[in-house]
């Protein structure tokens, strides 16, 4: 995406709907009755105002996930939502999306970083992109290009682009970067 294209985009910040306060950990607080009623209204307002998102970054907190599900119903569309789970375990399935948390056995350090670029754990993928650039890992160039071209996460795309510039220099991208 060219820099000029970014100027036509809008960033919409949406807070979770009214949550309940049962005796559960903060991350597990559900929506209150009023929140379940209001969230679809937010989706209808977004649609009527012309704010149909092409990407959603949603917290893993229960109230945020419930809000997004109800907002989608009001929107009448289902843009992709990225998994931003921060897993507190080094192996097994991701707590939110179910994808494996650990890299497949037998990968080199660079290989495991390239694998992490494709994992839905946003923090892990972002750290991997930054690390590959610091390492100047030339074998990561195809995966970094893919992250820039097809990634849903704007932060990951930016980190991957910075790493590509660190590895290859800015010259190969000069035609795509508009000032």
Image (spheres, rainbow, N blue to C red):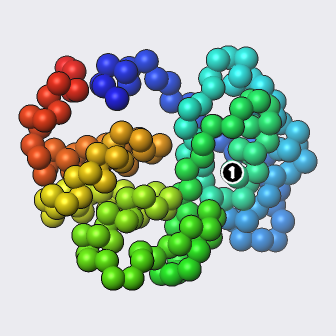
Which residue is located at x 36 percent, y 39 percent?
A: 149
User: Which residue occupies the foreground of this view, 38 or 110?
Assistant: 110
Q: Is residue 92 toward the left or the right of residue 76 in the image? A: left
- The percent coordinates of residue 113 (x first, y second) are 31, 67
On screen, 79 above or below 94? above
Which residue is located at x 38 percent, y 25 percent?
A: 6
Asked which quadrant contains residue 69, the reply is: top right
Which residue is located at x 66 percent, y 59 percent?
A: 61
- The percent coordinates of residue 18 (x first, y second) are 78, 46
Looking at the rendered image, the quarter that the N terminus falls into is: top left
- The percent coordinates of residue 73 (x first, y second) are 80, 36
Q: Can residue 134 be seen at all in this image of the molecule?
A: no
- The percent coordinates of residue 52 (x first, y second) are 63, 26
Which residue is located at x 50 percent, y 73 percent?
A: 101
The secondary element bearing badge 1 is classed as helix
Name the residue beneath numbered marker 1. Answer: 64
Q: How many marks?
A: 1
Q: Can residue 105 be seen at all in this image of the molecule?
A: yes
Question: Badge 1 local density, few (<14 within 10 Å), some, or many (20+)?
Answer: many
Q: Is residue 129 toward the left or the right of residue 138 in the image? A: right
Looking at the rendered image, the quarter that the C terminus falls into is: top left
User: Which residue occupies the foreground of this view, 33 or 90?
Assistant: 90
């Amino acid at each position: 995406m060219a820099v000029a294209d970014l100027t036509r985009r809008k960033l919409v910040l949406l807070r979770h709907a009214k949550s309940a306060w049962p005796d559960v950990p903060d991350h597990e607080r559900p929506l209150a009755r009023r929140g379940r009623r209001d969230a679809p209204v937010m989706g209808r307002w977004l649609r009527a105002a012309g704010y149909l998102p092409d990407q959603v970054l949603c917290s893993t907190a229960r109230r945020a996930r419930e809000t997004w599900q109800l907002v989608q119903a009001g929107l009448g569309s289902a843009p992709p939502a990225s998994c931003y789970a921060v897993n507190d375990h080094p192996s097994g399935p991701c707590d939110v999306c179910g994808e494996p948390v650990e890299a497949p056995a037998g990968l080199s350090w660079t290989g495991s970083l390239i694998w992490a670029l494709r994992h839905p754990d946003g923090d892990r993928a972002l750290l991997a992109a930054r690390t590959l650039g610091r390492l100047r890992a030339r074998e990561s160039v195809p995966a970094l290009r893919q992250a820039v071209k097809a990634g849903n996460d704007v932060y990951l795309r930016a980190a991957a682009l910075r790493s590509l510039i660190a590895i290859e220099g800015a010259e190969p991208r000069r035609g795509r970067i508009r000032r």
